[in-house]
Amino acid sequence: MENLKIKAFIPLLYLVWSDDLLTQKEFTTLREFITSLTLLSAEEQQYLLSKVDISNPPSRNELTQWKSDIERTIKDKSSIKSIFDIAAALSDKDSNIAALELNFKKLENDLGVLGEEVILNFKTKAGSFTASSQTNDNFDVQKLTEILDGEQAAIIKRVKSIISRPEFAYETSTDINVYRQKVYDWCKILADENLGNMAYPKQYGGGENIADYFAIMETLSYHDLSLVIKFGVQFGLWGMSVQSLGTEKHYAKYLKDIGALKLPGCFAMTETHHGSNVKGLETTATYNHSDQTFVIHTPHEKAQKEYIGNAAVHGQMATVFAKLIIDGHDYGVNAFVVPLRDTNGNTLEGVTIGDCGHKMGLNGVDNGKISFDNVVIPKENMLDRFASVNDKGEFESPIPSDNRRFFTMLGTLVGGRIGIPRSALSAAKSGLTIAIRYSDQRRQFGPEGGSEVPILNYRMHQRRLLIPLAKTYAVHFGLQYLTSRFLNRTESEMQDIEALAAGMKSYSTWSTRDILQECREACGGKGYLSENRIDALKNDTEIYTTFEGDNTVLMQLVAKNRLAEFRKAFGEMGSLGIINYVFENAKIAIAEKNPIATRRTDEEHLLDYQFHLQAFQHRERTILASAAKRIKKLVDNGLEAYDAFNVVQHQMIEVATAYLERVILEQFQIAIEKTEDLKTKEILLKLNQLYALSQIEKNKAWYLEDGYMEAVKTKAIRKIVNQLCWDIRPDAVSLVNAFDIPESCLRAPIAVYN
């Protein structure tokens, strides 16, 4: 190819043939580009067209020569920023190629190609990688930590100081009994530090600060997760059930001792055959008016309480959920305080306790099974905030509706669905800190003749760890929003908050599960060694997807809430309401789905947070309308509503996911807007862009099917995601250091800088 004008097209030809992801459409685009150039003679055009003939690919030698020409041209030239710059450098200065700059840039846009990324792919000399291998000080880590900790910075710092003490050194014994006792001892230390009673009223020894309680749970999760769950069972589930479902007489009798860990207890809701279906519980509490007692009874083995934390060894009492029976009438599920053991640890008469034994994780928690054989408790042991038995032996409740009373009772326990996702988030932060620090140091392979390269410099490794890092930051701000809404709740919005908590619990715990698996694999054999802690984090958080509500069931709850909101806005799922909603959605989408927008690939647009939010909102609205329309059609065709929901269950998960991702993105953007320090704001903005675009990339099949984007745009998004990973990489270690996890808690040799 002696013609210097023709040589200007080498980068385009190489790009087409070296990228196996380019399609027939891109070849067509390139051919149209060539034939439109009047600068080229007919002979030159014909030659170039022959080089983009799919049936006649270039030889390996020709491809190698093109690559060599490009590398030689861009070597040590920082001024080259685009494909056109390469073209101009390859061509003769008298060839008038400069006149084609706008044409080249339009072609880059049409192909969804980022010139800087292409150039970066060629710069594979050892120096270019090692120059980017060290952590940059692009922002103040401490300032980012302060943003993450927010108003709870003081309590977070205090808890970190406590769990860094020598007595909190990890227990390495494989003896389950030794481990359980160690976790109990840790809980006692925390109780002595007045951390367990943080959420209780001050007159009962508490701190009366639920926000600090959540922060304590989240911070403890940097340590041993068995400790977190034991702490949560004792002071959260057991103590908060007494506080939330009981009245003053219960507070005075129990709360101070619960907060001091003088009265270890349990939360006995789940039964062998009725896990998530609380309404279906079969344990009974039969009222005896003659002696004013309740008889707690397990009618058969499958109705035993199972997986109950604190039950196997330490629990002396339990909040037991059972069906209240008065004169043979079932008044639904209510809560009762039932003694299990005496102060010497002996099981009381009528109570049978079994040990669930060794588990996949959380073996410092003594999960057990509890059965009751006509156990008699006094009338005052009924937690009677929402229902009671009066002096005449009659059922009373300030909430007349059985359904509303049931959900109001469960709604008071929503705090657990805030504590668990925040705990899961901390586990994800720990795993990412270990994996990213290791990847920054671990060197493998490298360009021929050059030194080995940190594995975090490899694109796939960046995608494996930096996209999850961006998602973890996003979830952090989403959970801050959930916590704030819960703390400032009004009764009218409780249903929405409960649904959001259910969804965030699912989203965060699923995210942590997947992130820790990626961290394990990204660390290779080192990640498999117990000393590096990823195995403990993985095993302990597996159950997070199941307890406090099975994630799949919870996501259906979220979807039903969204459908209820749909009904409020557009009528009772009638055809007219759905048509109106679809019409409104279509009006909004007209501007976003015009041909210019669906094909727009310029960087300014793709990085714009308004585009991100609009894309998330469009997906949420469209999926919701589709689900509502489908359910309506099934019901109109004679299917029972119960069966109709079953048919579309898989779509319900999509409805919930789209809603949650929109909320998370929105809250991340709001947090960025509030950030005053410009450098901190800049790195958070990059993380936000990476979260948004990686989720769009993940759902690109949906966007393509819907017509919201064309292939050229989703291809450009893929390339922007790659570029963002590269841009964030120098700050990756600083970003995990901003979590400020105590080194004694990380305790992974591979996470220590030598």
Image (cartoon, rainbow, N blue to C red):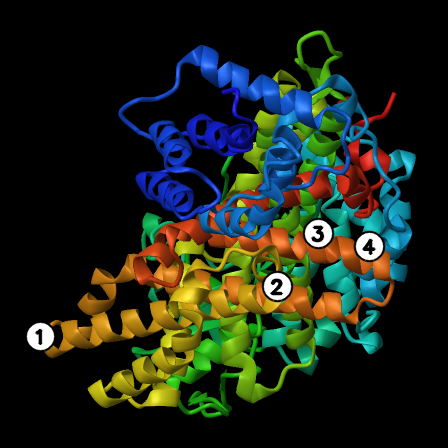
| Helix, strand or loop for disc 1 | loop
Residue nearer the viewer, 473 or 426 = 473
- On the image, the x and y values in percent for residue 212 come to 79, 65
Q: Quadrant of the C terminus?
A: top right
Which of labels 3 and 1 is toward the front?
A: 1
- First in residue order: circle 3 vs circle 2: 3
Estimate the spatial distance between the alpha carbons at disc 4 and disc 1, rounded to whole Å. 59 Å
Estimate the spatial distance between the alpha carbons at disc 3 and disc 2, rounded to whole Å. 43 Å
Q: Amino acid at mark 3?
A: Phe
Residue nearer the viewer, 675 or 631 = 675
Residue 481 in the figure: left or right of residue 754: left
Which of labels 2 and 1 is toward the front?
A: 2
Q: Name the residue that disc number 2 marks.
A: 608
- First in residue order: circle 4 vs circle 1: 4
Q: Residue furthest left?
A: 638
Q: Name the residue that disc number 3 marks.
A: 231
Compared to residue 581, the image places residue 677 above or below, namely above
Q: Amino acid at mark 1?
A: Asn
**Dot 4: within a 10 Å radius of its alpha carbon, few (fewer than 14), some, or many (20 or more) residues?**
many
Q: Name the residue that disc number 4 marks.
A: 191
Q: Name the residue that disc number 1 marks.
A: 637
Residue nearer the viewer, 175 or 411 = 411
Q: Are marks 3 and 2 in contact (CB under 8 Å)?
A: no
